[in-house]
Image (cartoon, rainbow, N blue to C red):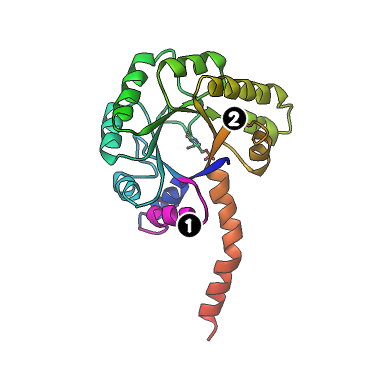
Amino acid sequence: MKRLGVNIDHIATLRNARGELHPNPLFAAKFAKNAGADSITIHLREDRRHINDIDAKKICSIKNLLVNLEISTNSEIVKIALKLKPDFVCIVPENRKEITTEGGLNLKKNKSKIKKIISKFANKNIRTSLFINPSLSDIKIAKELKTDCIEIHTGHLANLVKSKKNFSKEFQRIKKSSKLANNLGIEVHAGHGLDYKTTKILTKINEIQEFNIGHYLIGESVFYGLNKIIKIFKKIIKV
Ligand code: PXP
């Protein structure tokens, strides 16, 4: 069974836009779990633009909820993550000016740093994942670094599909990378830019066991929730 990880960072983005408490990411985490999410993803960014330290602490302490904490290789963030003890960590590249995670990790350049980080989490029995581009050489390095999982950055595929361009080359790249990782004993996840169509396309790759989806899923939820909420307000103002 393929698993769905729900990224709730954008609930915090919306909350922060008002500087108040609503909508509450803690509530979103519980709500998503009750709706069937297999895990919850939060990204504690160095700039804390959405999820903050208090959110992360509260969400990581919810019982019976699998939390996947995305972190950069920044030593302060790694220290915090080790204290938070999430179920899973996913190491991602981070660039202060980016709108979202723009690509996979540069494993070649950061080999020894990432290897040390992975072993710290492994010592605490925390599952590790590396967010990487679909590249065979990166998969081989990922194996050397002893990560449990990789998450393939699907942003390029998603952009090709959305702009109705030929995506078969990129799809094959993801497929070959997934197969190699699986053969090397690394669990394969996929994420970034996924909507209904791209997710469906990627389900054809058997080796992908987990999808981590945020922006589109939260965006769609607004539309499907509007109907109900407008009716509630109409009822309230009816005197
Ligand atoms: N996976 C990882 C590692 C990410 O960094 C992100 C974006 O924060 C996602 C998945 C979710 O991407 P999206 O919000 O485009 O669905």
| Amino acid type of the residue tagged 1 in the rendering | Asn
Residue 115 inside the magenta-drawn segment: no
When the figure is inspected, residue 159 is found, relative to residue 218, above or below; the finding is above
Point out the tag, 2 or 1, that comes first from the N-terminus.
Answer: 1
When the figure is inspected, residue 7 is found, relative to residue 165, above or below; the finding is below
Cβ(mark 2) to ligand 1 < 8 Å?
no
- Total numbered labels: 2
Q: Helix, strand or loop at disc 1? A: helix
Q: Horizontally, is 25 left or right of 185 in the view?
A: left
| Amino acid type of the residue tagged 2 in the rendering | Glu
Asked whether residue 107 appears in the rendered view, the answer is no
In the rendered image, residue 161, in percent from the top left (x then y), is placed at 69, 33
Q: Which of the two marks, 2 or 1, is nearer to us in this view?
A: 2
Label 1 Cα neighbours within 10 Å, binned few <14 / some 14-19 / many ≥20: few
Residues drawn in magenta:
21-39
Q: Residue furthest bottom?
A: 239
Residue at (58% x, 45% y) in the render? 216
Q: Horizontally, is 167 left or right of 77 in the view?
A: right
Q: Which residue is mark 2?
A: 207
The front one of 201 and 230 is 201
Mark 2 and mark 1: span between their CA atoms? Answer: 26 Å
Q: Helix, strand or loop at disc 2? A: loop
| Disc marking residue 34 | 1
In the rendered image, residue 156, in percent from the top left (x then y), is placed at 61, 28
Which quadrant holds the N terminus? Answer: top right
Residue at (29% x, 28% y) in the render? 123
Asked whether residue 13 appears in the rendered view, the answer is yes
Label 2 Cα neighbours within 10 Å, binned few <14 / some 14-19 / many ≥20: many
Q: Horizontally, is 207 left or right of 57 in the view?
A: right
Cβ(mark 1) to ligand 1 < 8 Å?
no
The front one of 139 and 167 is 139
In the rendered image, residue 148, in percent from the top left (x then y), is placed at 43, 27
